[in-house]
Image: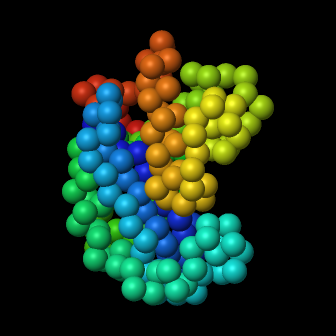
Amino acid sequence: MYCIVDVETTGGIKGPTRLTEIAIFRHDGQRVVDSFSTLLNPECPIPPFIQQLTGISEAMVAEAPLFADVAHEVLRITEGAIFVAHNVSFDFGFIQKELNWLGYDFLRRTICTVRTSRKILPGYPSYSLGKLCRSLEIPLNGRHRAAGDAAATVKLFEMLLRNDKHGHIPRPDQSYTQLT
């Protein structure tokens, strides 16, 4: 199993920054078999730049659940799965930080679709999610929103799985020890 994940946040990973949105698609290597997506109340201001980038306003998250309210669902849907994200250290790091604050250890095997795309699909001028999706004609609706970016990453990941002729993508049943 794989979990393709995207998060939106109040800023960079360092410091007291928080999640404002999360989307997770559980994938069995053939298709999406489960999903979870929600806005999150970060309990702190969302900088104007981030509000403009994501379209997520403080009013939108005022009544949203806290991360603590959905932590059990994040743990459940990612259990036993390889954590997949475009720039995985960012998304994984944020979720790990939030779970650590709640007293959970969060360790998952990880795959970065940026690095994996460079290996399996070499030669593109940019591997940013937006530009790579445009180059590969992958629809990207809701850019800089967790569900939109995660759904596009699912399509990218499926393309990577189909084109992985050299075993760059670990299969869930393989021995693979990378932990972020």
| Relative image position of residue 101 (x, y in whole percent) | 37, 76
Name above or below for residue 119 compared with residue 8: above
Residue 45 left/right relative to 95? right
Direction from residue 40 to residue 78 in the image, left or right: left
Percent of width and height locating residue 144: 60, 59
- Residue 82 location in percent, x, y? 34, 41
Find residue 133 and report its horizontal and vertical position in percent: 63, 37
Whether residue 112 is visible here, answered yes or no, is no
Taking the view exactly as shown, the residue that stands out farthest to the right is 125
- Relative depth, front residue between 141 and 162: 141
Q: Is residue 9 above or below residue 116?
A: below
Residue at 63 percent across and 29 percent down: it is 136
Q: Residue at x 28, y 34 (%)?
A: 28
**Where is 108 relative to 118, above or below?**
below
Above/below status of 142 relative to 3: below
**Tally of numbered discs:** 0
Residue shown at 26%/53% (left/top)?
Answer: 77
Along the viewing direction, whichever of 113 and 31 lies nearer the viewer: 31
- Judging depth in this view, the residue of 50 and 180 nearest the camera is 50
92 to the left or right of 54: left
Image quarter of residue 81? top left
| Residue name at image x 32 percent, y 39 percent | 32
